[in-house]
Amino acid sequence: MPVALPAGATPVTIAWSAPASPTAVVALAHGAGAGMDHPFLAGFADALREAGVACLRFNFPYVEAGRRMPGPAAHAAATWEAVLAETGRQLPGIPAVAAGKSYGGRMASMAASEGRIDPSALVYLGYPLHPPGDPLKVRAAHLPAIAAPQLFVEGSKDPFIQPLTQFDEVVASCRDAEVFWIDGGGHSFEVAGAKRPAAEVGARLAAPVVAWLGRRLSSA
């Protein structure tokens, strides 16, 4: 899929996972340190399909170029624009949801707050509120500008959202936001004493997300 960047169109890899008659489509972005083929994302996408929801996974341009560090935020926003345009072309008339693991979700929120995308809802799989151990560097000033419903799927032990009182205040500042907690979960939803494959961890998150989408999209 081509993405329009300042230097010209750049192709990025995409992967569809769709049932016969999807009720919604989730565009799913990866985190900063792994591309779209990470087992966590693949497991989540497969479980969405089984629940009747289509999913479009994609790479950001920096991953496609073989780089480890994320590129400019504007490049991520342009990618989100292209991805949601693609979901509209392939599945017209179906609610489109912007979702992402950590960095990918935050980039979706920034694009939405700037009016560059207009998803039916946003889902954050581990929102990176601040760098671990540095709660003064909060990445949340843009969140209240988002009109669409937002779901934060969060591990209660995630170092990116400690202290939880600060995170709760950020969620309360949003226009329309809810939190689904994974008790004892870390940033990748790992739980001490309950080691599971990443694909299974991702798959287990699909059910609460689909339930929330069903409730929120039907009332829109």
Image: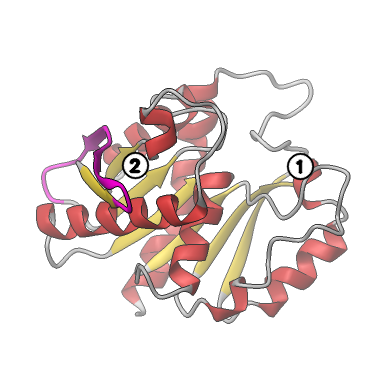
Circle 1 crowding by C-alpha within 10 Å: few under 14, some 14–19, many from 20? many
Q: Is residue 156 visible?
A: no
Name the residue that disc number 2 marks.
Answer: 48
| Image location of residue 172, percent across then percent down | 71, 76
Q: Which mark is residue 158?
A: 1
Identified by mark 1, the residue type is: Asp
The kind of residue on which mark 2 rests is Leu
Q: Secondary structure at mark 1?
A: loop
Numbered-mark total? 2
- The quadrant in which residue 28 appears is top left
The reply to whether the magenta stretch includes residue 48 is: no
Please state the extent of the stretch shown in magenta in the rendering: 5-21
Query: Percent position (x, y) of residue 21?
Result: 13, 50
Left/right placement of residue 86 relative to residue 104 reads left
Instruction: Give residue 96's position: percent from left, percent from top.
Output: 29, 61
Q: Residue at x 54, y 61 (%)?
A: 151
Residue that extends furthest to the front in the rendered view of this protein: 7
For the point 76% across and 42% down, which residue is it?
Answer: 158
Query: Could you say which disc has been placed on residue 170 in the image?
Result: none
Q: Residue at x 73, y 36 (%)?
A: 186
Residue at left offset 26%, top offset 48%: 3
Compare marks 1 and 2 and give the one earlier in the sequence.
2
Q: Quadrant of residue 36?
A: top left
Around disc 2, counting alpha carbons within 10 Å, would you say few (fewer than 14), some (14 to 19), or many (20 or more)? many
Secondary structure of residue under mark 2: helix
Q: Position of residue 120 (x, y in %)?
A: 35, 69
In this rendering, the answer to whether 67 lies above or below 151 is above
> Is residue 195 in sight in this rendering?
yes
Point out the image quarter for the N terminus: top left
